[in-house]
Amino acid sequence: MEKIVVEGGHPLHGTVRASGAKNAALPILIATLLAPGEHRLTNVPELADTLSTLSLMGRVGCPSLMGPVVRLDTTRIAFHEAPYDVVRKMRASVLVLGPLLARHGEAKVSLPGGCAIGVRPIDQHLKGLEALGARFTLENGYVHGTAGKLRGAEIQLDMPTVTGTENILMAAVLADGTSVIHNAAREPEVVDLGRFLQSLGARIEGLGTSTLTIEGVARLAPGERPYAILPDRIETGTWLTAAAVTGGDVTVTDTDPELLRAVLAKLVETGCEITTTPTTIRCKGPDRPKAFRLRTDPHPGFPTDMQAQLMVVATLADGTSTITETIFENRFMHAAELLRMGARIEASGNTATIVGQPRLQGSPVMASDLRASAALVVAGLAAQGLTEVLRIYHLDRGYEQLVTKLRGLGARIGRVADDAHDPAVLRGALDASPDPTVPA
Ligand code: EPZ
C-alpha cells in the first residue's frame, strides 16, 4: 500500500489537461452491452474503476483492450452476473442490470452495500426496471432480475438519482414502445451516456432536462466512429481549487466550462479570477480566499463531488463559511482530517460551519472516499510542511496520473510505501518517480 507525501507552500502554476470523466466512462463502457459488435471509445481515463469495469465486461464474456482507443467486443454475452468481489469495490457495477435485462433477459448483481458517504440504496433502480417489466428476487446479497421483452412505461423517480436514471435509460432504449422518466438526473455524465446511446441508434428526447422520453428500438449497433468521453468536471474543479488555495495561476485544458458553471461561480465568490474559452479554464487564486455559503444540489446546482474541495478553501478563508450537504447523509469525513491540520470546523447534521484560519499545518491524514482524498491532497498543497495522505487507493479510482499532473504544476509531491516514516525517505519521495501503472 502507498501514501502520498506533499510539501505545501508552493503556489501552483501552469497548464494541466483534464482526463475523460470517470462517471461518464463507467456507464458508457457498460452501455456497449446493448449493441452487439466492436465498439471504439476515446478519452477513457485509465483508472482503477475503468479497469475494473473492463474486467467486469470480461466476466460477462466481452473482451476489451485498454489504450488511447478502447476497444470492446460485445458480440456475445456469456454470463449475466456481477459478483460481490467486483461490486464491493465499485458500486457502479450495478449499472449492468439495465443492459443485461434489456439484451439478455437476465441479470444477477451483488447488492453494492453502503460506502463511507452513505447507505446508497438502489431502490429507484429496481422500481424503474420493474415498471419496464423486469422481476427481481433478493438472494444471499444478490439481486436477481429476469425479464421477457421489456415494455415502455412512465416512471417517476423519488429523487434525481444519477445511476438510477442511467440504469433505467439503458433498459428503456430496447423496450417495446415509449418510456418517460420523470425527475431524471440532469448531470452532464447522464447526457453523455444519452448521446452515446443515440450514436448506437437509440431514440431519446430531453437529455439534460428532468424529463427523458425514449422511443424503444428493436436493436442497436456500434457507432461508425469512436465515441469520445466528455471531460471530467470534478477533476477540473479539483485542479482549480488547488490554484485557489495556493495563490496560484492554473489553466485546465481539454475541459468545458459549461460542465461546472456552479463551481466556477463559487470560486469567483471566494475571490478567484476565472477566465474561460470553450475548452479551457484559467484560475488565479487570491492572496486569501473570502468566506462563502455553499449548498450542494443535483445538477445544475453545486455538485456534491466538489464539496470536500471547497471545504478546504473555507478552512483558509478570511471569515466564517457554511457548507450544507443535501445529497449524501455522511459526506463530512474529510472534516475530521482537516481538523488535524489545524482547521476549525463544526458539523451539525448536514451543515458544517468553518472558521477560516490563516494557514493549515501539514500532518498525516486518512482518505475515506474518492473526493475527500483529493481534498486532503489539495489541503496538503496549501499547508505548511509535509502532509501524508494514507489509503490513496481511493484516489487511484478517480484521478488519472494525479502526482504527475500536480508535479507539472510545480507541486512538491510523490508516492511512497505507507509504512515509510524516515523524513529523508519522505522528502526523497517528493522527487522520486511519480504515478506507477494503475492497479485494477
Ligand atoms: C453518482 O452516484 C456518482 N457516481 C457519484 O460520484 C455522485 O456523488 C452522485 O452520483 C451524486 O452526484 C457515479 O456516477 C458512478 P445518486 P449515484 O443515485 O448515482 C439516493 C464519485 O466520487 N438514492 O444520484 O450512486 C442516494 O442514497 C461518486 O465519483 C436512493 O435513495 O448517486 C443518495 O442519497 C461518489 N435510492 C442520492 O439518492 C436509489 O435507488 C443521490 O444518489 C438511488 C439513490
Image (cartoon, rainbow, N blue to C red):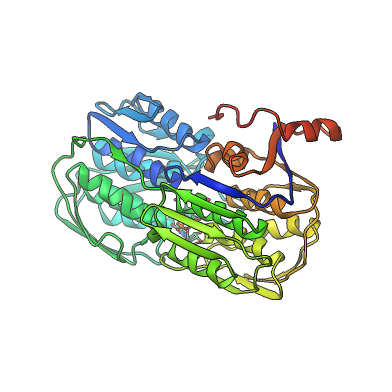
Query: Residue at image x 29%, y 52%?
Result: 169
Q: Quadrant of residue 22?
A: top left
Residue 365 rendering spot, x and y as whole percentages:
75, 48
**For residue 177, side relative to residue 35 (left or right):** left
Q: Is residue 88 visible?
A: no
Residue 437 rendering spot, x and y as whole percentages:
56, 27
Query: Residue at image x 79%, y 56%?
Result: 341
Query: Residue at image x 36%, y 29%?
Result: 60
Residue 336, relative to residue 136: is it above or below?
below
Query: Which of the two residues, 133 or 171, is positioned nearer the viewer here?
Result: 171
Query: Which of the two residues, 359 or 83, is positioned nearer the viewer here?
Result: 359
Residue 98 rendering spot, x and y as whole percentages:
32, 45
Residue 413, relative to residue 382: is it above or below?
above
Residue 284 rendering spot, x and y as whole percentages:
57, 60
Residue 134, relative to residue 413: is it above or below?
below
Query: Which of the two residues, 216 or 290, is positioned nearer the viewer here?
Result: 290
Q: Quadrant of residue 41?
A: top left
Query: Which of the two residues, 180 or 416, is positioned nearer the viewer here?
Result: 416
**For residue 133, side relative to residue 275 (left or right):** left
Q: Quadrant of residue 226?
A: top left
Quarter of the image with the N terminus in it: top right
**For residue 48, side relative to residue 219 (left or right):** right
Number of numbered discs visible in the structure rendering = 0
**For residue 20, side relative to residue 76 (left or right):** right
Q: Is residue 295 visible?
A: yes
Query: Residue at image x 32%, y 50%?
Result: 192
